[in-house]
Image (spheres, grey):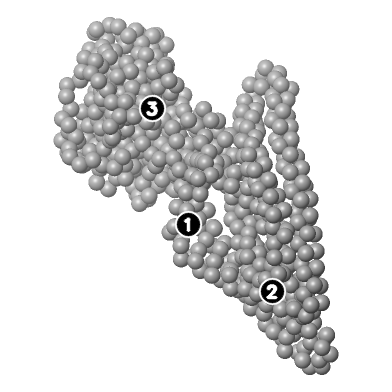
């Protein structure tokens, strides 16, 4: 998974804060006012010292004492308001970042997620988000207040006497050098810690997910050792961080000693020369002493900020990815579908992914679905490779006429699922193009993909269905379930459509999960349906029911079917046989059986394993 550069991370932060400039300005202004009020107690205390040194009566101390109380109350109120505004700014920006991260993560190509490992993505969406959220809620408001206190306190020292400021600044070179040294070592260290956390997450997921296989092969000790190795590496990185922090604070204590000693010496000299009163020197010493808290807080929070920035860079790396493979609708109607080309590799040139705009990306027409040729699909010169030099698809040309049901068959690894994902817009092709119709009136998308690995989201079953049709009424939900033969068992659930399903809820069978997925397809009402072995998860008992449900769900739509069961392919309008990433045959079930060849061999092998196969 990509990790953003510091410049990329800053650019994303600016982009997130830009719509919230008013809130940022208000929060900053209130924090400045609260910090300025916090600078009044020191001169008031210095004034009290002068009154006592001059032998003034006790009644003269009432006014500055009352002012101290009023200043404390005003500062407390202003600080609370400022922190609230800054926290609101951070929380809204963090919410936007989370939403954008999830949006981009859902659009990541599947092979990219598989190559990086689910542990990396899981660590980013859990650990990294938690660290950034903690920084936004606690570190960012406190850091802003501390930095303002440092700047305004140094200004107050200058107002007392510029020589007090000069004495205080003697600590700055040591502090600046220490901060630069710390950042130089902390940034790469914390980045490595986040990577190590992702590796541990991945190792744990692999071990727990494959627990049955690990026990079967008696590999418990080996996998426990691998987890231990990852954990030891992470602990070593953490201890390096602890040692770095200890050295960091040791250097800061030297700076504090230098600064405070210089301010006290300056006060002694100025009072002796009559250039300043005892009260003024007291205020200067108090000002510098009051810097210990903000400076230490800022530097402590700098440690938290480095951890958060490492996590933010990992989040920004995903959030800054392009919005997705689909483009906005293009003007003009789709080209008329041409007769199906002869099987075999395409000899004409194809557009590479790095070519002109639109190359290698599915495109949409501006013609409404269902009108003329606009509801068909045209695949031209399609090629794809998950790894360079190992193509999965090779110059595939394919036309699906409006309302036509085309089944893809072939051996495992022939490229069927890859072609289906590209047509559905889930996968970007390496070369070629796909033209899709516009969405039907009232529908949100032109094409919907249903795979054999459908997910049931936690919550009421009705809400799970409404993911595909947010405005669907209960009657429309029932109609969709009835169409895919699922209404009877849904009504038999404890609370019907209100039954909680998914994690922690009522368990559904594999066939029931696929029926829900087909019902979602009906509710989404796309012009084009892509079914990638959508009936493969059911056992033989549910296979016929799912095949009927799938046939009803795609009725009236252009459909591309990756057929796991050849009985489903036999009922399609046309069958496309694929081998080694190429289309080698195309025709009806009867035509391909009569020709002999690959499909006929597949059908014969399939029929030999079944006693209920229909006659050709």
Q: Position of residue 177 (x, y in %)?
A: 69, 50
Distance from disc 1 to disc 2, alpha carbons, whole Å, reads: 39 Å
Q: Position of residue 505 (x, y in %)?
A: 55, 43
Residue that label 3 marks: 532
Q: Is residue 34 left or right of residue 89?
A: right
Residue that label 1 marks: 17
Q: Earlier in the sequence, mark 3 or mark 1?
A: 1
Q: Assess whether mark 2 and mark 1 are in contact (beta carbons under 8 angstroms).
A: no
Numbered disc total: 3
- Asked whether residue 217 is in view, the answer is yes
Answer few, some or many: residues within 10 Å of disc 1's Cα (few below 14, many 20 plus, some between 14 and 19).
Answer: some
Q: Position of residue 76 (x, y in %)?
A: 65, 74
* Residue 280 against residue 24 in the figure, above or below: below
Answer few, some or many: residues within 10 Å of disc 2's Cα (few below 14, many 20 plus, some between 14 and 19).
Answer: some
Label placed on residue 161: 2
What residue is rendered at 48% in x and 30% in y?
A: 112
């Amino acid at each position: 998974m990509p990790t953003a550069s510091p410049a990329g991370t800053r650019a994303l932060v600016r982009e997130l804060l830009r719509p919230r400039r008013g809130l940022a300005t208000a929060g900053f202004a209130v924090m400045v006012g609260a910090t300025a009020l916090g600078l009044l107690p020191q001169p008031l205390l210095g004034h009290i010292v002068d009154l006592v040194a001059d032998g003034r009566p006790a009644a003269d101390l009432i006014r500055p004492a009352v002012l101290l109380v009023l200043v404390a109350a005003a500062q407390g109120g202003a600080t609370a308001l400022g922190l609230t505004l800054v926290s609101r700014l951070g929380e809204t920006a963090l919410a936007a970042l989370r939403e954008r991260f999830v949006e981009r993560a859902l659009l990541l190509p599947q092979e990219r997620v598989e190559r990086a490992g689910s542990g990396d993505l899981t660590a980013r969406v859990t650990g990294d988000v938690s660290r950034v959220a903690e920084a936004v809620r606690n570190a960012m408001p406190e850091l802003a207040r501390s930095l303002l206190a440092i700047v305004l306190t140094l200004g107050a020292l200058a107002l007392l006497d510029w020589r007090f400021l000069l004495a205080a600044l003697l600590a700055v070179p040591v502090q600046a050098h220490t901060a630069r040294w710390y950042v130089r070592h902390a940034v790469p260290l914390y980045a490595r810690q986040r990577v190590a956390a992702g590796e541990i997450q991945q190792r744990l997921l692999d071990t727990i997910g494959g627990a049955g296989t690990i026990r079967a092969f008696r590999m418990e000790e080996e996998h426990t050792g691998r987890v231990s190795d990852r954990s030891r590496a992470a602990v070593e990185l953490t201890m390096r961080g602890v040692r770095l922090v200890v050295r960091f604070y040791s250097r800061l204590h030297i700076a504090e000693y230098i600064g405070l000693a210089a301010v006290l010496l300056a006060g002694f000299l100025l009072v002796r020369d009559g250039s300043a009163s005892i009260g003024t020197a007291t205020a200067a010493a108090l000002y510098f002493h009051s810097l210990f808290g903000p400076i230490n807080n800022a530097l402590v929070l700098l440690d938290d900020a480095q951890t958060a920035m490492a996590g933010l860079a990992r989040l920004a790396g995903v959030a800054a990815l392009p919005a997705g493979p689909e483009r906005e609708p293009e003007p003009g109607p789709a080209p008329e579908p041409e007769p199906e080309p002869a099987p075999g590799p395409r000899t004409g040139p194809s557009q590479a992914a790095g070519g002109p705009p639109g190359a290698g990306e599915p495109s949409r027409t501006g013609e409404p679905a269902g009108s003329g040729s606009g509801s068909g699909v045209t695949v031209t010169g399609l090629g794809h490779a998950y790894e360079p030099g190992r193509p999965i698809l090779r110059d595939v040309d394919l036309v699906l006429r409006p309302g036509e049901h085309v089944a893809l068959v072939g051996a495992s690894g022939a490229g069927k699922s890859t072609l289906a994902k590209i047509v559905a817009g889930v996968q970007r092709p390496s070369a070629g193009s796909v033209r899709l119709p516009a969405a039907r009136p009232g529908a949100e998308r032109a094409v919907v993909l249903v795979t054999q690995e459908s997910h049931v989201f936690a919550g009421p079953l009705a809400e799970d269905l409404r993911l595909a049709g947010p405005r669907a009424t209960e009657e429309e939900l029932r109609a969709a379930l009835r169409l895919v033969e699922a209404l009877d068992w849904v009504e038999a659930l404890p609370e019907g459509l209100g039954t909680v399903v998914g994690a922690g809820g009522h368990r559904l069978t594999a066939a029931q999960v696929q029926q829900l997925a087909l019902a979602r397809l009906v509710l989404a009402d796309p012009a084009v349906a892509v079914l990638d072995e959508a009936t493969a998860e059911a056992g033989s008992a549910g296979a016929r029911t799912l095949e009927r449900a799938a046939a009803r769900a795609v009725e009236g739509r252009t459909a591309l079917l990756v057929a796991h069961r050849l009985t489903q392919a036999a009922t399609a309008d046309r069958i496309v046989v694929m081998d080694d990433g190429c289309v080698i045959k195309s025709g009806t079930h009867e035509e391909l059986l009569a020709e002999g060849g690959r499909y006929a061999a597949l059908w014969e092998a399939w029929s030999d394993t079944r006693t209920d196969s229909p006659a050709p």
